Amino acid sequence: MHHAAALKLSALAFAASLTFSFLLFPALREAQHLNVDPDRFGALALNIAQGHGFAYDPGGAPVVERAPLYGYLLAGLFRVGGYSLAAVQILQAIFHAATSFMLFLLALRLWDRPTALLAQTIFALHPVALWYTARIWTETTFTLLIASLALVLFIFFESPSFKRSVIAGFLLGLSCLTKPVMLLFPVALLPLLTIRFKMAGVKNGMLLLLTTLLTILPWTMRNYFVTQSVVPVNTSLGFNLVQGDAIGEAWPWGGAGTLEYWNIAGRRVDSVLASVNGRWQSVEGDRKLVRVSLAGWSASFVARRFLANFCTFWYLSESGMKSAVIGCLQGIVLLLSFLSYRRLHRTARNALSPIVALLVYYVFATSMVVGWGRYSAPIVPLLVLLASPIIERWRRSSP
């Protein structure tokens, strides 16, 4: 089989994820008192599976602060066998393996076969990617979507067409329904498409944007029926902006873990919403927090805020030790990807332009809101893709 080695590495990724989830994670969970469902997606999915709708509890208020795709994905799983953390972990191990294979296919289009296999191996065993496969978090699903989108965008930029525009737009829509930070990416792509393909690029870019909007439209309509307000995917932007403000003000002395910044932001949210008797999850509370956050922005604060959140984006986690470990791992691959990219020929850089655009957009958009370390996990495949040529070069030159 042509891709037999890559399929074996996908099996390795699957096995590595299961090993971490079932053998290592239980001990870490007990020692660090980890919540396996911090965003309550498991409770949400079980409620959906039992026929009670997109809410945390039977008869509870409809949830608008969570994007829908991950919850409905788990609901399909729970509908078959009931609530099971093990089932989620197995599903996410499959997704981790699939992401590794997507990375191989993309790397094979850019580099030679040994480099593509090296990239796949690194990702398959990457501790940051493995960490999120054990808990009920969106990161593993979103990582697969980002890797798939990168591959489709690369093919799309080789020769834009109606079919490729629709596929890219649909994947981007699914990404938005997992994390709405991707909502403005089609707009960011338009200048690149225009420069590369002139009016044909504009036409295909607009088709991609239209497909993205049509993909999220049914959920936007659901939100309108529930809230009588236009909410494209979900609320919580205001809450996240306030957290980003807290990081911008207190970093780097505010603490080495998320808890310190979370507490600062939580007190501010409570203070702002006390006057309107609101909840940050509601449309009214969310918009109030957005207005208050943006009203406090000045040019100097925005610069400091962005720098702080850009830095914490690469490491900030629950504890100082975990932040240090994630920061080292992400810092190494980020540095290697930068050095590798600088050494590439101009032709290779042009081929990489849509992937670099995706990477830069995601980092910039996230850092403008709030920089938690977990948010850097979904771009690990893209960083590994960029870093793999220089690592393979060093491997070949070693005795």
Image (spheres, rainbow, N blue to C red):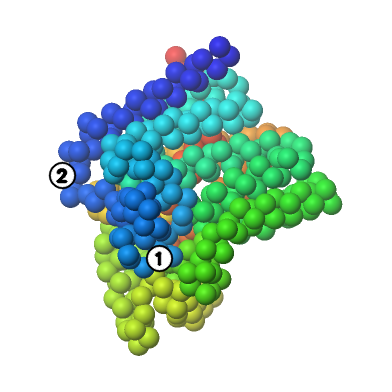
Q: Which mark is residue 169?
A: none
Q: Nearer the viewer, residue 310 or 253?
A: 310
Looking at the rendered structure, the secondary structure element under dot 1 is loop
Asked which quadrant contains residue 77, the reply is: top left
Amino acid at dot 2: Glu
Q: Which mark is residue 62?
A: 1
Question: Is residue 325 visible in the rendered structure shown here?
Answer: no
The percent coordinates of residue 240 (x first, y second) are 41, 66
Whether 381 is drawn above or below 245: the answer is: above
Which residue occupies the extreme bottom position in the image?
275
The percent coordinates of residue 344 (x first, y second) are 63, 34
At 48% from the left and 63% from the top, the residue drawn is 234
Q: How far apart are the two marked residues, 2 and 1, measured between alpha carbons?
A: 32 Å
Q: Nearer the viewer, residue 149 or 308?
A: 149
Amino acid at dot 1: Pro
Q: Which mark is residue 30?
A: 2
Looking at the rendered structure, the secondary structure element under dot 2 is helix
